[in-house]
Structures are given as structure tokens and as C-alpha cells.
Amino acid sequence: KTNLVIAIDGPAASGKGTLARLLAERYRLPFLDTGLSYRAVAQMLLSKNLPLDREELAAEEAGRVDLGRMDKAMLSLHAVGEAASRIAVFPMVRRVLVEKQRAFAQNPKGAVLDGRDIGTVVCPDADVKIYLTASPQVRAERRLAEIEARGGTGDLETIRKDIEARDARDSGRADSPLKPAADAHLLDTSELDIDAAFTAACAIIDKAL
Ligand code: C5P
């Protein structure tokens, strides 16, 4: 086997983006943060002052998303993530974006993708599936540390509530809810730092190869 597809799923602020990026480097694979594609749709609607609750409008913007041209800095805003989880409930939007994500995963080398539905919907045949979790408290602390490292401020309690609300929306939706695939390896990082999480993930992957 010459290609390797690695699926990383998990809730908001679970550290999956950081882990997926490190794994892509380690295994020399292209990397796609699928959350950015939902964020890109939300950002386009927000910037055009269009409503977030119209499925056809959102699907039209989804058609315009270019996975190779997503500006991470602009899309990382909290409000954009919040809006992304609203348009991510629409099946028409998901159908359009999932098709682009699958095309990315078809790379002859393989790929690392991170998101909410990679192991369940986008790449059900992935070679390795990892589902990252951490308690809402730990995730909120990490998110706050990240904000403070960039010179910002935030309130831990508010961040934790936001994270829990986003989890509820992502897990509760009918189309492609956030949940571990039956064959995913669960990795709880509540008590692991990023180095330890990376080491654990590499052990899972190397065993599966
Ligand atoms: O991971 P990130 O916070 O960037 O994702 C933003 C939102 O996009 C999530 O809250 C979720 O609603 C949606 N999303 C999704 N499926 C994915 C990736 C993200 O529904 N594969």
C-alpha cells in the first residue's frame, strides 16, 4: 500500500488541528482542515450581509469555496466558527463541501484530514481514524491560553459555555453529526500535552500500517 489516509475528528478546541498538522509533517502527507471550508462559507455570507439560515444561499457560497485558497487568519475569528456551525447543519452545503474534501483525500500519496465527520462520512475507508476528546473545562482553558498568547483576553466561563453550545449543535444535527466512527481510536487528551498526544497518535498509526 502506497497511500495513507488519516482521519482526525473531535469537538471544538480538542487540539485536532494541531495534532493533524504534526501528523501530516511526520508522515509527509497533504493536510486539510475541513473546518475551514465551513468557515469560508460562513465568512462569505457574513461579508455579504446574507442570512445564515437560508440553505440554498449557503449552498451557493459552498460551490465557490476553493480548498486551496482559504485564509486561515481571517477565518479563525470566534464569530466565524459560530456561524460555521449554523450553516454546517444544511445537507446541501455538506454535500457540496464533502465532494471537494473527498477529491482532496484522493491524492495519490494519501492525506490527513481533520473535522467532525471525516471518519464517518468523508473518508469512511480511511486507514486510521482517531477521535480526539478532552473535557470541556480543559478545552476552554486551552482556547483561553491560545487567545492570551495572541495578546487577547477572554472569560473562561464564557468560553466553556460557548464550547458546550457548539458541541451540542454539532452532535445534535441530523446530517453527519459529530460522533466517533465505530472503528475510530479514541484519544482523550484531557491529561496529555500536545507532545504526548502526538506520540500516542503516532503509536496508533504505526501499529495500523
Ligand atoms: O473545526 P472548526 O471549529 O474550524 O469548525 C467550525 C464548524 O464547522 C464546526 O463547529 C462544525 O459545525 C463545522 N464542521 C463540520 N464538519 C467538519 C468540520 C467542521 O460540520 N468536517
Image (cartoon, helix red, strand yellow):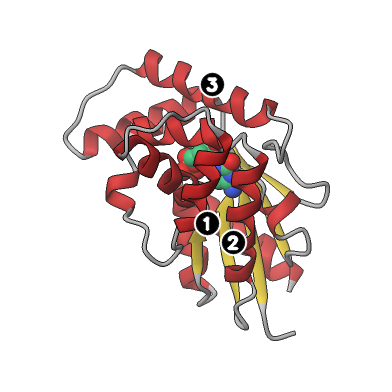
Mark 1 neighbour class, 10 Å CA radius: few under 14, some 14 to 19, many 20 or more: some
Q: Earlier in the sequence, mark 2 or mark 3?
A: 2
Mark 2 neighbour class, 10 Å CA radius: few under 14, some 14 to 19, many 20 or more: some
CB atoms at circles 2 and 3 under 8 Å apart? no
Q: Earlier in the sequence, mark 1 or mark 3?
A: 3
In the image: residue 153, left or right of residue 109: left
Decide which of 179, 186 is in the foreground and name it.
179
Q: Is residue 192 visible?
A: no
Q: Residue at x 72, y 37 (%)?
A: 175
Q: Which residue ends up furthest to the right in the rendered image?
A: 182
Q: Earlier in the sequence, mark 1 or mark 2?
A: 2
Horizontal and vertical percent position of residue 20: 51, 58
Q: SS of the residue at dot 3?
A: helix
- Mark 3 highlights which residue? 164
> Tag 1: residue type?
Phe
- Label 2 CB less than 8 angstroms from ligand 1: yes
